[in-house]
Image: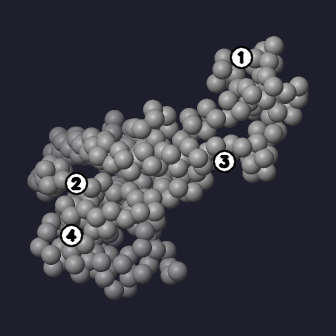
């Protein structure tokens, strides 16, 4: 699979892309139509220590949602958080360079926002953990908005740095992320028909996974395993379900488990510890704690 390259700095990223030296040590807007990737980094796995937001803007943009492909001609925005793995490939840039459309990558180091309010809530922007095939598809209007913001960021860090520079840059990053939240909300709505099919598939899957025989054999399903089964990233599936049903994946798991527990408590004389094992809990105390958190009473009290 090749060597693993750890990219912990903006300067190394510029080196990989054969790009001019960065004008700021912690943030950079890279024009992907002007890169000259260095051949020695080709086909290497890359673990990045940076946040990246990339605009891919070309008509050859087939994006896979779940197990189906959808075309989007306007442009796609892809997000990556520190610690994610990608592959350096250069063939994909040939079309980008020649189609005359704007393509860019905004990269910033966690140290830039670490002491700010944004640093404490950056994990709330769950799309940083979406898979690439769950990209944000932008209309021309939305693309102009995000590009305008990143150009403002670029203008700010290219100026002489003063005491206000970092605050202005960070506030613009937050503005960008908030717009992306809004646009993802729009995307979930416009794809409502597709999403309803996903909800139906999820409901069938979780009913099968919370079946007593399956629980005894495999234990309680995880958010990750359910998402993988449907071909989505955990955060994307949770956000999709939240939009459509009001509950995320974890809440659906809990709801099905507690209903199964109530049925066993009321319709069997099995001891609580036995029920806990049948439901996939490793320890009866964990089941009792879970049940009380969900219903406000212990399993024994509920049975009485």
Q: Is residue 45 visible?
A: yes
Cα distance in 3D space between marks 4 and 1: 57 Å
* Residue carrying label 4: 59
CB-based contact (under 8 Å), mark 2 and mark 4 = no
Circle 2 crowding by C-alpha within 10 Å: few under 14, some 14–19, many from 20: many
Locate the C terminus and report the quarter of the image it occupies.
top right
Q: Is residue 174 visible?
A: no
Chain-order first, disc 4 or disc 3: 4
Residue 254 position, x and y percent, is 62, 34
* Residue carrying label 2: 138
Chain-order first, disc 2 or disc 1: 2
Chain-order first, disc 3 or disc 2: 2
Cα distance in 3D space between marks 3 and 1: 27 Å
CB-based contact (under 8 Å), mark 4 and mark 1 = no
Could you say whether the residue bearing mark 4 is in a helix, strand or loop? loop
Numbered tag placed on residue 208 in the rendering: 3
Chain-order first, disc 4 or disc 1: 4
Say which residue appears at 50% left-offset and 45% top-offset: 200
CB-based contact (under 8 Å), mark 3 and mark 1 = no
């Amino acid at each position: 699979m090749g060597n693993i390259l750890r990219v912990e700095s903006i300067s190394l990223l510029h080196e990989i892309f054969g790009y001019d030296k960065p004008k700021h040590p912690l943030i950079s807007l890279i024009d992907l139509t002007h890169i000259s990737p260095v051949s020695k980094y080709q086909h290497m796995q890359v673990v990045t220590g940076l946040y990246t937001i990339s605009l891919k803007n070309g008509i050859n943009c087939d994006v896979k949602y779940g197990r189906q492909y959808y075309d989007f001609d306007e442009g796609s925005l892809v997000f990556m958080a520190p610690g994610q793995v990608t592959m350096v490939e250069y063939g994909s840039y040939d079309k980008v360079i020649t189609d005359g459309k704007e393509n860019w990558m905004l990269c910033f180091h966690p140290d830039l926002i670490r002491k700010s309010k944004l640093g404490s809530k950056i994990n709330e922007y769950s799309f940083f953990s979406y898979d690439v095939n769950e990209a944000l598809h932008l209309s021309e209007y939305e693309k102009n908005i995000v590009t305008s913001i990143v150009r403002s960021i670029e203008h700010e860090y290219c100026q002489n740095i003063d005491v206000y520079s970092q605050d202005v840059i960070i506030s613009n990053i937050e503005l960008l992320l908030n717009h992306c939240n809004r646009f993802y909300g729009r995307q979930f709505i416009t794809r409502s028909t597709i999403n309803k099919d996903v909800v139906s598939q999820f409901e069938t899957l979780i009913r099968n996974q919370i079946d007593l025989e399956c629980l005894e054999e495999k234990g309680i399903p995880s958010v990750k395993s359910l998402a993988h089964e449907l071909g989505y990233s955990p955060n994307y599936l949770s956000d999709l379900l939240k939009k459509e049903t009001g509950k995320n994946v974890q809440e659906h798991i809990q709801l099905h488990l507690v209903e199964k527990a109530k049925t066993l408590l009321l319709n069997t004389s099995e001891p609580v510890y036995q029920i806990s094992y049948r439901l996939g809990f490793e320890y009866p105390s964990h089941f009792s704690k879970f049940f009380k958190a969900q219903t406000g009473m212990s399993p024994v009290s509920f049975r009485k």
